[in-house]
Structure formats: C-alpha cells, structure tokens
Image (spheres, rainbow, N blue to C red):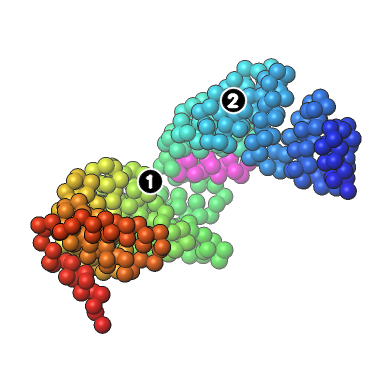
Amino acid sequence: MSLQLAEQFEANEQYEQAYEEYKKAYINNPEDIGILERLGHISLILEKTDEAANYYYEILKHDVTNALAYEQLMTIYENTDKYKYYIYRGNKNSLEGKLEYAINDFKKALTHTQDDDTQVVMTRLTLANLYTQIGNSLKAIDEYNLILEYDNLHEEIFLQLADLYLKEDAFSSAIDVLNRAKTKGFNTDRINEALAAVYLRSGDAKSAIEYTKDELLKIQSMLELGKIEQAYDILQNLPDEYKNSPRYYTLQAQYYYSAKEFDKALNFIDEYNKVAPNSPLTYQMRALVYDENGDNYNAHVNWGIYNMLRKNNDIAINEFLNAVQIKDDDINVLFTLADLLTETGDSNHATEYYEKISKLDPKNKEALRKLAQFRESIGDYRTQVEYLEKLYDADEKDLENLKTLARAYEKIKAKDKAIGAYNAYLELVKDPNEYKLAKERLDKLDNYGSADAEESTGLIDKIMGFFNKK
C-alpha cells in the first residue's frame, strides 16, 4: 500500500509525504531500482542532495549500466565536487564505449583529488585499464609505475604491471616489478609463481625451478634444461588430478618432441586440442614438430594458422603462400589463403586461389560464389553470369543464386534468360515479400516487348527443364 500511496502523493505534488511513503516501500524492497529512482528524484526536488546521491549510488550497485544514475550524480556533483563529477562522467563514457573521452575525464579527475592517495591510486588504476583496452600498453605501464610510488598497495597491482611487461617481452622489467613486490612485503606464492613463469619465458629455466612450487612448471623447466628423462619420470608419476590439465598434454608433447618421437608428440597435441580447442598453442606446437621432422608443408600451414589466430595476417599469408608453393591441391588451405587475402584487400590475388579451388572442385559453391562476386565488383557481368550458371549447375535450388543470376542477366540484357531465371525463382521461393519483389521484376520484363538479340536457349532450357522433371 505504501507504494500506491507514495505515487498518489507524488501525483498531487505532496513531495514530503511521497518521500516518506517511498522510504517505507524501500525498506520492504531495497533492491527495487524503480523505488530508488523515485527516491532520488524526490530527494532532489526537496533539495536533499546528499540523500539523492546515496540513492543513485545504490542504483549503480545493482545496475552498473544505469545511465540515469550517472547523469543525476554528474548533475549533483558538477558544482560541488569536481572529482566525483569527472569520475561519474568517465564511467558513463566508458560504459558507452567512448574510451578516449573516458580517459580525458579520469585525467581531469586526477587534478581534483586534493592529494588523497586512495583517490589517486584508484583513478590511475582506471586509467591504466582504459589504456590497456585501447591497446596503448606503454601509457598503461606509465600509470602503473606512478601507482607503485604509493604505499598500502595490493599485490594484484604488481602482477598486472608484470603481465603488461610480459606482453611486451620486457622480461627484465617484469622480473624487477615482481622483486619489488617482494621487497614491499608480498613474498607470496602468486608473486613467486609469476616470477617463475617470467624466468621460464625469458629462457632462465634454472631460476624458474627455484621459485615455483608448481609440479608442471618444474617439469617444463627440466625439459628446457635438457633433463628429459628426469622430467619424464616425474611426469609419469604425477597424481591423477594433474592428468586432466591441458598443461599435462603439452608437457607430454614437449617430452616426445625432445625425444624425437614425433608421432606421439602429435597425438598429445591432438589431446590438448580437445580440451583447449583452436588455441594458437596447438598450431605452434604442431609447427615445431613438423619443422623438426622435415615436413615443410605442414609446418608452413600450422605456422600460418598460428599467426592468423594471433591476428598477424601478413605473416600468416606469407606462410600459406610458402605452403601452396609446395602443395597446391589442399582446398581448405587454399580457401584460408584466399579469404585472408580478401580480408586484407588483395581481392585480385585472392581470385587466383578461388580459381584453383574451382578447377580442383568444379562444383564448389563457395568458390563459384566468390568468383562471381569478384567479377561483379569489377563490372565484368558476362563472366559473373558464367560463374553463376556453374553455380546453378551445382545447386539448382539455391534461391539466392537464382535471384542474383536473374539480375545479372538483366545487366547483360539477356531478357529471355532473366525471365526464365525469375520464373524458376518464383517456383521455389516461399517468402511472400521476396515472391512479390521478384514478380514485380518479372512483370516489368514481360512489359518490355520482344526479347533482346541475346540467344535465349541454353541455360533457360535447363532451368525450365528442371521444373518438368518427373
């Protein structure tokens, strides 16, 4: 009853009474965002700005994407607390994907912290995160290094900065940061394991063993140090719970790679791929195995996929080009190469490989479709028609192709053939809107009078013959 009464008081502009009733409703429903919004709104009318701010803050605790709450908090603090004003504006811009604007807001907030260490650290942490999101790792690193000048930090800050250095392959800097964490009192397992991982990545497996308690990382370090049989003995005697870890399969693969038992290495890489599908590491490991056993074709293919997954498209294209120079009849590889070339804007070069696919598999619909699209893009409509006709031969019920073919016939002024294609399309299409549009095109063609000089036999006979099949 309190909520209905509150709404009635509000409608009558009896705001004090409405406020009291909404508060009663809030006690019974503390997570009701609608009630919180009403309380915030009426608090502002009654000039209870501190209470209004609390209600809007409560809304954000339940719904961090609530635009109204950010806007109202910005209004509340615009002339009274510039730090909070820019913080809320920055958060709103961040949620809306306006990251550059958000960065500017948080930088402005920094100028209004009044040397409050907590505010400075939290604001710089947010800036570091935003710089990371936009791919500016160097500025993110700068923010973290400024944060490290303050006391009472959490070990997570050191770990995040070390991770950024690691992504930049700045191993010595990552090690320095983690050792700095230890001098600040964070001699924890997380810091030591992070140190071990960095040492291993940097090629110092001996130091990695000193810092880690992780059995799998110890085994990996032993393999790196050439202690192959010792590592294998430990690997084979691991407790069962380790054997469900993806890392277990990578270590088995690494052992057999080191022992030059390449088939077994590939089997364990396949097992790894089952638990971590399509990971770049799968293709990197396969590429290393194929490199080592002299299978250049599969090495190039796997290096290509590895770099493609890591968005290194130029390197990936080069690897696939090297692969097809060795063997040019693998349709999957040819498609991957052609699609990558198309994605990078080299459509002319891509077309060469779609042509290769079409020769290897004359009824390959995707290759024919790509070739037709390319010919249309350069205005070669007659060759486009040839590919569309081949596509029709491959699949007479492909509606999209029939519609495209009809339009292509119109472009080359093959009226009778266009009519035949539209009639074939109308026999198959189920969508009433599509049927109506095609029928309108067909009626217009019928009204043009006699057919053009284009020969009307050939494909039209095949199309119409299709419908006469018993």
Inspect this view and state whether residue 459 appears: yes
Horizontal and vertical percent for residue 317?
Answer: 26, 47
Horizontal and vertical percent for residue 97?
Answer: 53, 36
Which badge, 1 or 2, is on the more N-terminal residue? 2
Inspect this view and state whether residue 357 appears: no
Nearer the viewer's eye, disc 1 or disc 2?
Answer: 2
The three-letter code of the residue at mark 1 reads Arg
Where is mark 2, residue-wise?
106
Q: Nearer the viewer, residue 197 or 224?
A: 197
Q: Nearer the viewer, residue 265 or 463?
A: 463
The image quadrant that residue 254 belongs to is bottom left
204 vs 426, left or right, is right
> Is the stretch drawn in magenta largely helix, strand or loop?
helix
Seen in the picture, residue 267 relative to 297 is either above or below; the reply is below
Seen in the picture, residue 128 relative to 459 is either above or below; the reply is above
Residue 310, numbered label: 1
The quadrant the C terminus occupies is: bottom left
- The span shown in magenta is 186-200
The three-letter code of the residue at mark 2 reads Phe
**Count of marks, rendered view:** 2
The image quadrant that residue 11 belongs to is top right
Q: Residues within 10 Å of mark 1 (few under 14, many from 20)?
A: few
Magenta highlight on residue 193: yes
Magenta highlight on residue 391: no
Residue at position x 69%, y 25% in the image = 75
Residue at position x 66%, y 30% in the image = 71
